[in-house]
Image: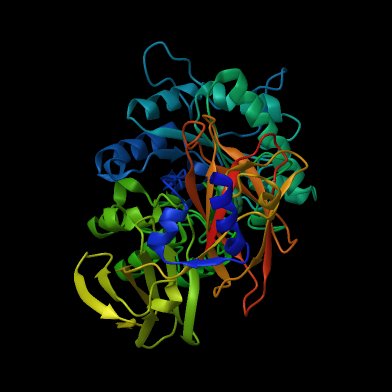
Amino acid sequence: MIAKRSRLLASHAFAGAVLSSSVLLMAQGIAKPVAVPPPPMGWSSWNSFSNTVDSQVIMNQAKAMATNGMKAAGYQYINIDEGWWLGQRDAGGNIIVDPKAWPAIADGEQAGDMANIVRYIHGLGLKAGIYTDAGRDGCSTVGPDLGPSYPNTGSEGHYEQDFLQFAQWGFDYVKVDWCGGYKENLDPAIQYAEVARAILRAEAITGHHLYYSICNWGKQSPHTWAPNIGGIATDIWRTGGDIVDPIVAGTKNSDRKAKFKEVLREFDQAQHPEAQHSGFYNDPDMMVVGMPGLSDAENRAHMSLWALSGGPLLVGADLTALSPAALATLTNMDILRIDQDSLGLQSFKVSESGPGLEVWAKPLSTIGERAVLLLNRTEAPASITVHWSDLGLRGDSEVSVKDAWTQTELGEFSSEYSASVPAGDAVLLLALGSEGATTLYFPEEAKTETAVGHNLTISRNQQLTFSKVTSRFAIARVRITYGNPDKTPRFAELRVNGRIATRIAFPPTGGDAASGILSIESNLDINGAKNTLTFSTSGDPGPAIQSIAVQ
Ligand code: GLA
């Protein structure tokens, strides 16, 4: 009986069955959307302290985060960037830090032990981040910002030792820069894979997790390999350069200014929606919200861009000197909800009505909800219109529109909404409507199974193929119904039309029979083209994939 019903389903499904969202839910059974790890939120020392970072600076910033409303809003990392270490090692190769810069903080502690500052940060209920370089030297030898050039501040030749040390000190996050690697003309995919291996080893020894952030400024397209370097992954990868050189109060660099056009440049560099899903994130750089140079409106537009992009929210401003307006911008819970949305997807540009007049949208986890940005890059105010059908929403039904910053209800609108956007500014909206049509596909390989449409587990050297897949959108939303009975993610690689694979993490779905739905965004060929999506795995076993629904 089951087989018969399944065959029936299959007979029309392989060509793709166009379904409304309610029929789709039935076809996908009781599967529920799974939540993926959100992008990190925190603070980093580089933008405001450069190489002057020390224990006192970090304690002051951590105290500020714990008490100014940022911790309550979800910020948690206090990240120590370059300048904490001057390149010295003992005879055994262990890192030695300046005991005056990193003294004892509590009774019984030793000066020069980085565990002191970690304990302090943890004591405030926050997490601690540290920094190194994948090469032999750090950035100070390439372009020293403040202070002299210190050679040997990288981890090359000491990966296992250094990352074990970071975990033993208690750090929760590590940023790995590329100045030394670049200087030596190393291959970033290889070096960062070696670092990933050293991190896995450190985690296995200490039982302590290190969140892994890489920073090679988008060189050699890390979005194509960072989530999958020989079967291991980085969590976030920088996609471009620095928005600003550090602005350090009381130094020769104090009169530098952040510029909004550099914020836009890094936002643009970070757009790789096909690589950002299932907990892996493009990193457009630390934010400059609250730093000298940006107006309140530019701070809000910057925050809107990062939230829409699902970017890591790592604040670069001095937290002890934030204006009330900047603090309000950083802690607006409605905007943070967009950034931290449990689908973990990135925005993409859905239309451009004229040069510099753009509509960007990000699918959110509430069915039928999108964050929509009307972005005016020109020097004159302009009206910008969003059409519901461009968002994958039904164009013929009413969509309720809210201002995302103020949560003001703007009303119900059929087919489109227009707003006047000031020059060089953006309007961020929340649009809630009905999902547009979705097409359901089952794997080719299921044709040979009796239980067509049931979970087919991918294992090494096998693949699942979804063919003749069409979409109206160049960036298609693909919802994968799958099962993973383990307690940790399983992984699969997806190739679209034989192009370079993107690695997908499939979070646990519960017991053996339970399924979940994971959303990703894929670069499909449009205009009636029939795409082929192939899932394979380099680890064993992979997830059990049942169907994909494509919008
Ligand atoms: C590079 C990185 C920055 C910062 C500095 C430190 O430029 O891109 O984020 O870490 O190095 O020197």
Residue 435 locus on image (x, y percent): 39, 67
Residue 236 in sight from this viewpoint: no
Q: Residue at x 70, y 54 (%)?
A: 501
Furthest toward the front, the residue is 1
Residue 113 locus on image (x, y percent): 51, 21
Is 273 rendered above or below residue 158?
below
Residue 462 locus on image (x, y percent): 75, 44
Furthest toward the right, the residue is 185
Q: Residue at x 61, y 46 (%)?
A: 214
Total marks shown come to 0
Along the viewing direction, whichever of 118 and 46 lies nearer the viewer:
118
Furthest toward the top, the residue is 108
Residue 441 in sight from this viewpoint: yes
**Screen quadrant of the N terminus:** top right
Along the viewing direction, whichever of 396 and 102 lies nearer the viewer:
396
Q: How is the image coloured?
A: rainbow
Residue 233 locus on image (x, y percent): 64, 41
Is 235 rendered above or below residue 474?
above
Q: Is 337 positioned to the left or the right of 137 in the image?
A: left
Q: Residue at x 42, y 54 (%)?
A: 26
Is 286 rendered above or below residue 71?
below
Along the viewing direction, whichever of 245 and 131 lies nearer the viewer:
131
Q: Is 360 positioned to the left or the right of 445 in the image?
A: left
Along the viewing direction, whichever of 482 and 74 lies nearer the viewer:
482
> Which quadrant would residue 92 be assigned to in this image?
top right
Is 527 rendered above or below residue 482?
below
